[in-house]
Image: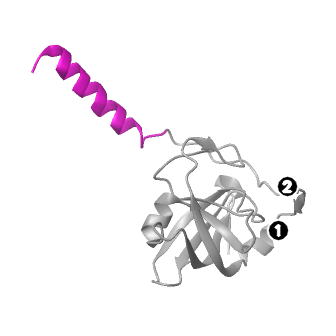
Amino acid sequence: MGLLKKGVVVVALMLSACQSYHPAQPPYRGYKRAPYTVKGMRFVPMTIEQALHYNAVGVASHYEANGAHGAIGERLYRGDYYAAHRTLPLPCRARVTNLSNGRSCEVRVADRGPYIAGRIIDVSSAVAHKLDFHRHGLTRVRVEVLSVGDGAYKRTR
């Protein structure tokens, strides 16, 4: 193999390896609980205490925010286990369980949404794959908050 071809192969391998790599982000300071408006609808996030007792059943969908910033400014990358919720304080960690097959996954809720009636959470495509509903697009799930906040702000049940 010529030197130029070797260089192209090395660069291609480096690029493919970098697609799933991203530097660790510093913990979010505090909690994002400010009310906000989307499409004329006002949303008021719940208190920390309400969130620590949050346990709901509803419909989940999935999305891909590859490289986009979530509601608290963190970049959301393909392959990460993240989620969006309308009223949970950000950031928080939750367990999402697919009720049709019992599979569950822990996610970081760092974004806002979904804004489609009848849906309680949007999860990343990686989570949808793990929960085995990526082909269907929607599934019934249970969402249980495990903790709210990061670092010194982290609160658990």
Which residue does the image show at 28% across and 33% down from the upper left?
13
At label 1, which amino acid type do we have?
Met
Q: With 77 as the anchor, is 152 left or right in this view? A: right
Q: Give the percent coordinates (x, y) of residue 110.
A: 66, 55
Residue matched to label 2: 39
For label 2, the SS is: loop
Q: Is residue 2 left or right of residue 54?
A: left
- Kindly state the secondary structure of the residue where label 1 is placed: loop
Q: Residue at x 63, y 47 (%)?
A: 27
Which corner quadrant holds the N terminus? Answer: top left
Sooner in the amino-acid sequence: mark 2 or mark 1: 2
User: Where residue 64 sits in the image (x, y, percent)?
Assistant: 55, 52
- Mark number, residue 46: 1
Q: Quadrant of the C terminus?
A: bottom right
Magenta segment range? 1-22
Q: Position of residue 46 (x, y in %)?
A: 82, 68
**Residue drawn at the location 56% of the way across and 41% of the way down:** 67
Instruction: Report how many numbered discs are placed on residues in the image.
Output: 2
The quadrant where residue 48 appears: bottom right
Chief secondary structure of the magenta portion: helix
Determine crowd level at label 2: few under 14, some 14-19, many 20+ residues with C-alpha closer than 10 A.
few
Q: Residue furthest left?
A: 1
